[in-house]
Image (spheres, helix red, strand yellow):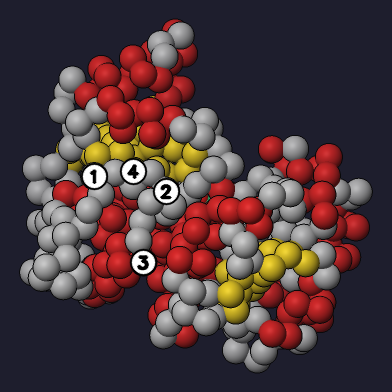
Amino acid sequence: MPSERYLFPHRHLLGIQPLSPQDITAILDQARAFEEVCERPEIKVVPALRKRLIVNLFFENSTRTRNSFEIAEKRLSAEIINFDADTSSLSKGETLMDTALNLESMRPDLIVMRHAAPGAHALLARHMKASIVNAGDGAHEHPTQALLDAYTLRQRFGRLEGLRIAIVGDIRNSRVVRSNLWLLTKMGAQVTLVGPPTLIPRGLQDTWPEVKLSNDLDAVLPDQDAIMTLRCQFERGTGAYIPSQGEYARFFQLNAERLRRCKPDVAVLHPGPINRGVEITSEVADGPNSVILQQVTHGVPVRMAVLFLLCNPHGEQVP
Ligand code: NCD
């Protein structure tokens, strides 16, 4: 729970970059309180956002994130509108800004948006009174994913500081990795990015100088507390950067043999959706070291915490 003097200082959640370690801790602590609500045997609802109107605007595909936000909103008793981009006037050529300003005229309190254009959220935030929450913007940021990853790691290891985490795979196209780089470096974790040279863009160490880079997964594995595998984003052209899926798997797939090189209690993460048999085998994804479904479970209280703190900067005990 945030301390009495602490005030969550943000109106929007555009990314992890603007958050301080204290803000991140406040969200994770608030999520802990909401996890108790989600784990109740019967009524898993609190009135915290009663009468608040939230618009979910998803311009890109989503399974976990969209449902998780919607469940979080329902658990907080908010009123919800789901905007369907396919049946909206966007298909008649309306611009994003016009769509947003028209929605704004209906006075929503919060807009949760996924959009392919990095910067779309910041644009809306500049022009709108509603709080904007980034649910993924192109290859830029996906802040609630990094927060739920951090929540899962903190629950498993009791801390983030000093944890050794390898993030493996399609670094080039992943917004998940960028939000995680901000979060994990701010919280003092030791991050190693692993992948073929073609999937690790130049210049990352200009922004995150403390992060290590490697092309040798087998050498990195034994030291790690957690391995975060990333989806090969074939819809964003990853196929052009690897010789073949089989060749990629030969060097970078997390499989049972590679898991044996790791610490016995290593945590295996993946943001989903999984390309089974490419970046990770089913044996590992469904095995005892995997926390992949726990990540999904934690997405709900973490998103409840974000929505709640944006509307109630003081934080609050859960009734
Ligand atoms: C990710 C996304 O959409 O950015 N998935 C998610 O939100 N859980 C990762 C991905 O698509 O690979």
Position of residue 111 in the picture relative to residue 231 (left or right): left
Q: Residues within 10 Å of mark 1 (few under 14, many from 20)?
A: some
Residue 88 visible? The answer is no
In the rendered image, residue 253, in percent from the top left (x then y), is placed at 78, 66
According to the image, label 3 marks what residue? 21
Three-letter amino acid code of the residue under disc 4: Val
Quadrant of res 285? bottom right
Contact between marks 2 and 4 (CB within 8 A): the answer is no
According to the image, label 1 marks what residue? 11
**Disc 2 versus disc 3: nearer the observer:** 3
Q: CA distance from mark 2 to mark 1?
A: 12 Å
Q: Earlier in the sequence, mark 2 or mark 4?
A: 2
Q: Identify the residue at horizontal 30%, vertical 62% (top origin).
A: 23
Quadrant of res 208? bottom right
Q: Which mark is residue 15?
A: 2
According to the image, label 4 marks what residue? 133
